Image (spheres, coloured by chain):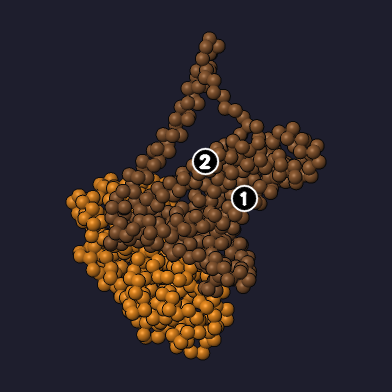
C-alpha cells in the first residue's frame, strides 16, 4: 500500500508537471468566467478543515500551491477523516469548513445553520470525481458496458464474461468463458454510495439494493479502500471492480466505457466533467447541492461531486477572509486546472460561475 | 514479550509484611504494587463502563435482534444490525489459527528448550521473538499480496479431495479473501506468543525430573512426555490463551484480508467472513451516530468474549495444576 501511495504521489507530481508544460491547451474546460486566475489573493492566518477522504489528494495539491504562493504566514490543515466526521467537526466549531461527499442532510443542515449564527451553511461543489469500472481480462483492450450489465455484474445476476448482456455491447471483442471476479469496497465509503446511486437510477429492475455507503448486494469480494480494490483487480484474472479514476490510472488498469443509450463514452476526466456540468442545482440561493442526472447520455455518467461546506455568513470572524480567499483560489481556473491531472474532474460551465458567485458571497 | 507466565511450582508468599523488621522501603513498595494492582482493575471497569454507556443508544435504536442478525446497517432507517456473522467469523478465524499455531508453537519451544544445540537455540529464540515485533499491517499486506495467490492451490486441493466435508467445499470458484487465508496469517502472528511463553516454561522444568526420567531408561521423547509436559501443561495453556487473545482481537491484518461480508459461511476457502475488530476498523470512519454506537456495542461483545475465554483458561489451569505432578 505504501508503494502504491508513493507511486500515486509520483504520478500526481509527474502529471502536474506535464499539465504545467501543456498549459493553455484545451482540457475540456469551456469557461472564461469572472475571478479568472491572476495572482493568488493571499490572507495570512491558520485554517482548519476536515472531512471527505475522496478529495484528500485535491486538497493536498491546493494547500501546497496556496501555501507556496502565500508563504509561511498561511497555514491550512485538512484532515481526511471522512465526510460524517468532517461535518461533525464543522458543527462543533472545530473547523472552518468541511469536505463532504454529499450535501448536508436535514438534521445536519439544521445544526450547521445554527452553528453559523447569522447565516445559512452552504454546500459548494468544488471537486468532481469519476468512478470507473476497472477490469483485468487478458487480451481485452476495450470494454463497453450498459448500466444494466453493470448492475447485473454487481448484483450477481451476470456471472460470466461472455454473458449475452455483455456480448451485446461489445461486438467483435473476444470475451472469455470465465467467471467474473467482482470486487467492491469492504469499508464504508462515499464511492460505494455514489456508485450505487448510479445503479439505482439507471437499472432499478436489476439493482434492487438502493444506495448506501455500505455494500449490500450478495456475492463478489470486498477490499479495503479504492487502493485495495485496485490491487485486488490487478492481482486477479477476469476481475472487475469500481474505484475512483486516479486509482485505475495508477494501477494501469483498463476502464470500461459506459453506454447510456447513445453510444460508448470513455471513462475520462473530460467526459465526466460534462455530466457534472449538466447537474441541476437543488439547493436554494448559494446553496449549490446538486442533483446529478445519471441517465445523461452525452457524458460519462458515473460521477461523484464533493462539496466544501461552510458558512455563507456568520463564520468565525477571524478566519472568514482566509476561508474566502482559499475557496476563491480553489474555484479559480488555476485551482480547477489542478484537478484533471490528479485524477479528479473539474467543475466547468455555468456551475463553475455559480460556485464563484457563492464563494464571493461568503462574509 | 511482557506477558505473565504461570509458575505452578512457586508457592505464593502468603506471609504479610509486619513486625519490627518493616522498613520504610517495604511500605512504599507494598503501596506501589497495591496501587498497580488496583489500577488494572479500575482500568478494566472503566473500559466496560465506557463501552456499555456508548452502546446503549444504538441498542435502543436497533430494530433487529442484536445477537441473531447477520447484517450491519445501523445508520439506515430503521436501524438493522446484529453480531451473528461477526461472532462466527471471529471465533472461526481464531479457532483455525489456534489449531494451526499451537502444535507448531509448542514444537518450536520444545526444540529450542530440549533438542537444539545451545547456540542454535539462542538464535531461534531470538528470531521467534522478532516475529512478535512485526507490525500487524505488515502481516496484512504480506497475506494479501503474497499469501493469497499461494493459497489458491491449497483451497483447490481441499475442494477436490476433501470437498465432501462441507467445511472444505468451494462452490464459488474463488479462493481469495477467505477465512482460511486470514486464519493462516493469524496463526503466524500468534506463533511467537505461543512459542516464547511455552519455551520459558519448558526451560524451568526441574533438572531432577528430567534426569530421573532419563535414568529410568526413558528416551528423549519419553522424557518430554513424562516430565516436561506434565510440569509445563498450565504454562502451555496459558500461552495458548494469550495467543487466542491476540487472534480474537487482531484488526488491521484481518480487515485487509477478509472480504468482509455479513454472511455465516461454513465453507472456509470461499471469499467472505468478517470479525468484530475488522468490522470496527472498516466501518468507523464513515459511521453516523448510531453506527458509531453500534460499533462500540460490538466492541463490548468482543470484550466479553475475551473475558470469558480468559476466565475459562484460568479455570482449566487452576484445576490442572492440582494433579500435574509438578510438586
Please tell me which residue lies in front, A75 or A120. Answer: A120
Secondary structure beneath dot 1 equals: helix
Image location of residue A135, percent across then percent down: 51, 75
Chain rendered orange = A
Label 2, label 1: how far apart the Cα atoms are? 19 Å
User: Is residue B45 shown to the viewer in this render?
Assistant: yes
Q: Chain of mark 2?
A: B
Image location of residue A185, percent across then percent down: 44, 65
Q: In this figure, what is the number of numbered marks?
A: 2
| Residue A127 falls in image quadrant | bottom left
Disc on the earlier residue, 2 or 1: 1
Please say if A207 is above or below A319.
Answer: below
Please tell me which residue lies in front, B289 or B174. Answer: B174
Q: Quadrant of the N terminus of chain B?
A: top right
Q: Chain of mark 1?
A: B
For the point 48% across and 79% down, the residue is A159
**Residue marked by disc 1:** B102
Amino acid at each position: 500500500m505504501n508503494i502504491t501511495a508513493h507511486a500515486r504521489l509520483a504520478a500526481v507530481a509527474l502529471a502536474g508537471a506535464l499539465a504545467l508544460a501543456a498549459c493553455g491547451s484545451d482540457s475540456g474546460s469551456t469557461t472564461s468566467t469572472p475571478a479568472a486566475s491572476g495572482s493568488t489573493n493571499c490572507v495570512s492566518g491558520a485554517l482548519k478543515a476536515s472531512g471527505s477522504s475522496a478529495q484528500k489528494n485535491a486538497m493536498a495539491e491546493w494547500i501546497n500551491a496556496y501555501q507556496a504562493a502565500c508563504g509561511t504566514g498561511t497555514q491550512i490543515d485538512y484532515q481526511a477523516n471522512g465526510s460524517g466526521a468532517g461535518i461533525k467537526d464543522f458543527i462543533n466549531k472545530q473547523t472552518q469548513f468541511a469536505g463532504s461527499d454529499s450535501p448536508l442532510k436535514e438534521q445536519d443542515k439544521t445544526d450547521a445553520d445554527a452553528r453559523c449564527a447569522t447565516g445559512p451553511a452552504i454546500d459548494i461543489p468544488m471537486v468532481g470525481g469519476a468512478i470507473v469500472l476497472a477490469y483485468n481480462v487478458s487480451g481485452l483492450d476495450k470494454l463497453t458496458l450498459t448500466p444494466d450489465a453493470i448492475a447485473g455484474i454487481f448484483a450477481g445476476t451476470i456471472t460470466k464474461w461472455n454473458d449475452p448482456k455483455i456480448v451485446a455491447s461489445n461486438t467483435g471483442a473476444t470475451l472469455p468463458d470465465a467467471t467474473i471476479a467482482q470486487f467492491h469496497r469492504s469499508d464504508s465509503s462515499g464511492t460505494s454510495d455514489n456508485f450505487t446511486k448510479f445503479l439505482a437510477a439507471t437499472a432499478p429492475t436489476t439493482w434492487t439494493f438502493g444506495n448506501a455507503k455500505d455494500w449490500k448486494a450478495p456475492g463478489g469480494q470486498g477490499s479495503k479502500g479504492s487502493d485495495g480494490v485496485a490491487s485486488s483487480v490487478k492481482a486477479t484474472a477476469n476481475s472487475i471492480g469500481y474505484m475512483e479514476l486516479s486509482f485505475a490510472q495508477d494501477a494501469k488498469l483498463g476502464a470500461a466505457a459506459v453506454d447510456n443509450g447513445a453510444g460508448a463514452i470513455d471513462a475520462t476526466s473530460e467526459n465526466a466533467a460534462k455530466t457534472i456540468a449538466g447537474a441541476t442545482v437543488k439547493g436554494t440561493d448559494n446553496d449549490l447541492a446538486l442533483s446529478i442526472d445519471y441517465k445523461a447520455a452525452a457524458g460519462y455518467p458515473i460521477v461523484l461531486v464533493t462539496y466544501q461546506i461552510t458558512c455563507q455568513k456568520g463564520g468565525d470572524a477571524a478566519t472568514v477572509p482566509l476561508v474566502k480567499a482559499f475557496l476563491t483560489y480553489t474555484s479559480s481556473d488555476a485551482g480547477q486546472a489542478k484537478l484533471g491531472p490528479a485524477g479528479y474532474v473539474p467543475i466547468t460551465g455555468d456551475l463553475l460561475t455559480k460556485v464563484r458567485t457563492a464563494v464571493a458571497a461568503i462574509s | 514479550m511482557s506477558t505473565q507466565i504461570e509458575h505452578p511450582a512457586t508457592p505464593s508468599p502468603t506471609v504479610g509484611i509486619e513486625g519490627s523488621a518493616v522498613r520504610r522501603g517495604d511500605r512504599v513498595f507494598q503501596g506501589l504494587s497495591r496501587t498497580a494492582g488496583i489500577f488494572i482493575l479500575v482500568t478494566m471497569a472503566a473500559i466496560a463502563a465506557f463501552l456499555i454507556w456508548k452502546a446503549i443508544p444504538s441498542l435502543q435504536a436497533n430494530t433487529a435482534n442484536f445477537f441473531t442478525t447477520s447484517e450491519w446497517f445501523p445508520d439506515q432507517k430503521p436501524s438493522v444490525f446484529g453480531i451473528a456473522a461477526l461472532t462466527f467469523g471471529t471465533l472461526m478465524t481464531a479457532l483455525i489459527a489456534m489449531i494451526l499455531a499451537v502444535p507448531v508453537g509448542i514444537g518450536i519451544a520444545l526444540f529450542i528448550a530440549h533438542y537444539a544445540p545451545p547456540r542454535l537455540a539462542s538464535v531461534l529464540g531470538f528470531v521467534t521473538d522478532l516475529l512478535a515485533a512485526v507490525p500487524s499491517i505488515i502481516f496484512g499486506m504480506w497475506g494479501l499480496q503474497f499469501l493469497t495467490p499461494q493459497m489458491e492451490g491449497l483451497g483447490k486441493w481441499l475442494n477436490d479431495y476433501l470437498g465432501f466435508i462441507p467445511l472444505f467445499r468451494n462452490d464459488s470458484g474463488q479462493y481469495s479473501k477467505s477465512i482460511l487465508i486470514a486464519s493462516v496469517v493469524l496463526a503466524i502472528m500468534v506463533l511467537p506468543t505461543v512459542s516464547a511463553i511455552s519455551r520459558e516454561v519448558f526451560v524451568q522444568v526441574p533438572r531432577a525430573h528430567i534426569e530421573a526420567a532419563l535414568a529410568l531408561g526413558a528416551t528423549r521423547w519419553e522424557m518430554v512426555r513424562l516430565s516436561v509436559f506434565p510440569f509445563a501443561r498450565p504454562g502451555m495453556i496459558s500461552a495458548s490463551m494469550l495467543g487466542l487473545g491476540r487472534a480474537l482481537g487482531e484488526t488491521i491484518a484481518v480487515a485487509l484480508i477478509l472480504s468482509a461480508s455479513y454472511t455465516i459461511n461454513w465453507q472456509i476457502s470461499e471469499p467472505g467472513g468478517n470479525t468484530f475488530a475488522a468490522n470496527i476498523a472498516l466501518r468507523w470512519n464513515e459511521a453516523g451516530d448510531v453506527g458509531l454506537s453500534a460499533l462500540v456495542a460490538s466492541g463490548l461483545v468482543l470484550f466479553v468474549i475475551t473475558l470469558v475465554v480468559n476466565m475459562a483458561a484460568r479455570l482449566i489451569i487452576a484445576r490442572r495444576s492440582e494433579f500435574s505432578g509438578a510438586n
